[in-house]
Structure formats: C-alpha cells, structure tokens
Image: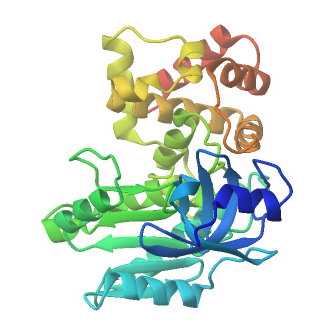
C-alpha cells in the first residue's frame, strides 16, 4: 500500500521543515525508477529535498515517492570504495574509475594516473590556500567525483541527461545537484592543454569550495563571489601558490584585459548595484566574469582577512533561504566598510596600476 512520504516524515521526525544537515537520519524510497537512500533536508506538502549517500541533491514532490521507510537514525555517505563501484556500473567498461586522495575520477581507459592525480593535487592546493589564510575548512562529507569524457559529444550528451543548462562554448561545469565536476578532454579535440587546465582548476575550485564550507551548497552566495573565486584559481599563482609566489603569477591576464575593455567602453553599474544582484551574469556573462574576478582579486590581495570573513559570512546563512539584494549589500558593507564610493575608487585604481 502506498504511504504518503510527508506524513511519514512528520511522524518519525521532529517537525522542523528545515533540519541541520543529516539530523534526520537516513530513509529509503523509490523515485523515478531508482532506489534512493539519503537524508531529508527539507520537506513540505509540495516538495522534499533529499541528500543521497553519494552526495546528490534530489528535489521531488512527496507524492511521487514510493516504498519509503526510515532505515537509520544517522546518516553516512558511501565510502570511496562504494562510490567507485557505483560509478563503474554507471559508466561501464569503456571507462575506468581511479581514486586518489579525496577524489574518485571516471576517465577514458588508461589515463587514471593523469586525471586522478591532477584533481587530487588541486584539492590539496585549494585547502592549503585557505588554511594558510585562516579559514576553518570543513572535512568533505563525500568523496569528490569528477567525470572526464573523451569527446565533446559525450560531454554534452551527459549534460542533457542531467538537465544541465549550458551553452555550446562550455568546456566543463560543476553541478550543485550531482556534486560532480563534468569535463571533456580537449586535447583529444586538437585544442591546447592550457584551456583544459583552466577549466579543471576553475570547476575543481567550485567543487572544493562547496564541499569544505567556503560556500554553502544549499544557500549559495552571490554569483560574483563563486565565479570570482573560480577564476582566481585558474592562475598558477593561486592553485600552486607554494611554488609561484609573485603577484604577477596570480593575475588572470585575459580577465584583466576584458575588465579594462568593459570599463572603458560601456556604462557600468555602481559597486552597490553590482554586489546586490546576479543580473549582470544574465545580461553579459563575459563582462560579468571579468568584473567578478577583478573585484575578488582586489579584495583578496588588499584585504585578505576581511575577504575571508566575508566568505565565511556568506557561507553561514540558513539553508534554503533567498539571498536578497538588500541583505547582500548589508553583508558586503559590514565586511568592507560603508563608503562604497571610496572602495570603488581604490578598486579601480588598483586594477589600473596592475601590469
């Protein structure tokens, strides 16, 4: 007999429609032809947010779930070995699955040493960058998963299956829903490895940030914060800061040039407008990425402690809450000062003097 999931959750759990991560224990259910095992994070008559043991975030109407039961008062992720086995079954014999450190990487056969080691080194570098600056990183709750496709066609087919909205020029992405990085090997398409490297470092930075508490996965920060940080990690002076220590190694020169062109040729938003909205990314993504990098780089270089505290503030917001413009502006001013006109003047001078 079919039971109603919402009623079960109310019956077996304290009635808090939003719970701290994993506080609700583990339930099993059938949804969309799959048997899911995970922790309910939020629920109502209209929707359930479920975090499964492989790290995927599911959202569905409770009426569409069947055969559910509570199986444990605690929640634990699948082990790295369990994740490897599940990924091998998912992707089949044309791919291999290799583990290295915190990562489990699906890749074309024979390339495990290359891909798994790269991703694990990037995660280690990310952790070094933030711990050296005093950020109290969380331990990742799940093995970090990356999928490397051999061709562009395979990559876009997989993105369509995941219902990911990406444009034709995208080289890879990190998904909040699946908690995976998805890329394709551009060297197989005759492209320069450096493009692959920038994509990997950018998306791996997103994944590390959302799994270590730099960003909140269930209440993301403003987009300029996430993308600015991702672009910063494209440079060797950030992702390999122990070896490359000069400021010039940390400058993303293409974004610097793009930002200067943008500022010189078009009317611009004030800093207050910019930090309050994600609209620039919908209106002109190229300019928005350039400005996100420029502002993030300025703050991290000139006010690193304030920048770290600001990241921690944006990551500490309650799950499943909207981050509205006035609150964004209030948090930014609390971190960097009330006089944004003066801050913007110093920011633009800093960018103008960069070489």
Q: Relative to the observer, which residue lies in front, 236 or 307?
A: 307
Residue occupying the point 74% across, 51% down: 133
Q: Position of residue 307 (x, y in %)?
A: 70, 37
- Decide if residue 274 is on the left or right side of residue 280: right
Q: Position of residue 48 (x, y in %)?
A: 61, 53
Residue occupying the point 30% across, 62% down: 161
Residue at the farthest left position: 190
Q: Relative to the observer, which residue lies in front, 93 or 252?
A: 93
Residue 137: tell me if it is visible. no
Q: Quadrant of the C terminus?
A: top left
Q: Relative to the observer, which residue lies in front, 48 or 337?
A: 48
Residue at the farthest right position: 14
Residue 295: tell me if it is visible. yes
Residue occupying the point 43% across, 63% down: 181
Reply above or below: 344 against 100. above
Q: How many marks?
A: 0
Reply above or below: 154 against 294. below
Q: Quadrant of the N terminus?
A: bottom right
Q: Position of residue 230 (x, y in %)?
A: 49, 48
Res 131 quadrant in image: bottom right
Residue occupying the point 77% across, 70% down: 25
């Amino acid at each position: 007999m079919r039971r109603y999931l919402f009623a079960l959750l109310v019956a077996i759990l304290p009635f808090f429609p939003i719970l701290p991560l994993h506080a609700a224990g583990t339930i099993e259910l059938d949804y969309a032809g799959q048997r899911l095992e995970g922790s309910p994070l939020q629920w109502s008559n209209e929707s359930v947010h479920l975090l499964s043991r492989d790290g995927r975030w599911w959202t569905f109407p409770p009426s569409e779930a069947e055969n559910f039961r509570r199986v444990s008062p605690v929640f634990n992720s699948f082990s790295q070995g369990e994740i490897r086995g599940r990924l091998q079954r998912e992707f089949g014999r044309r791919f291999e699955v290799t583990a290295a450190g915190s990562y489990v990487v699906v890749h074309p056969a024979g390339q495990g040493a290359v891909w798994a080691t790269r991703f694990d080194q990037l995660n280690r570098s990310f952790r070094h960058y933030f711990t050296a600056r005093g950020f109290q990183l969380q331990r990742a709750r799940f093995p970090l998963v990356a999928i490397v496709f051999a061709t562009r066609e395979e990559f876009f087919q997989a993105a369509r299956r995941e219902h990911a909205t990406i444009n034709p020029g995208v080289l890879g992405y990190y998904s909040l829903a699946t908690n995976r990085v998805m890329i394709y090997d551009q060297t197989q398409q005759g492209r320069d490895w450096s493009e692959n490297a920038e994509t990997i470092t950018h998306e791996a930075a997103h994944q590390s940030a959302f799994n270590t508490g730099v960003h909140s996965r269930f209440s993301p920060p403003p987009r300029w914060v996430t993308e600015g940080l991702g672009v910063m990690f494209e440079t060797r002076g950030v992702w390999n800061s122990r070896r490359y220590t000069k400021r010039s190694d940390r400058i993303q020169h293409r974004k610097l040039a793009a930002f200067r062109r943008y500022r010189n040729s078009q009317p611009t938003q004030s800093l207050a407008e910019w930090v309050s909205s994600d609209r620039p990314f919908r209106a002109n993504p190229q300019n928005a990425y350039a400005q996100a990098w420029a502002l993030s780089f300025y703050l991290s270089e000139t006010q690193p402690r304030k920048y770290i505290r600001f990241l921690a503030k944006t990551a500490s917001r309650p799950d499943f809450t909207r981050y509205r413009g006035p609150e964004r502006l209030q948090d930014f001013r609390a971190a960097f000062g009330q006089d944004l006109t003066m801050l913007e003047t110093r920011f633009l001078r800093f960018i103008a003097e960069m070489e």
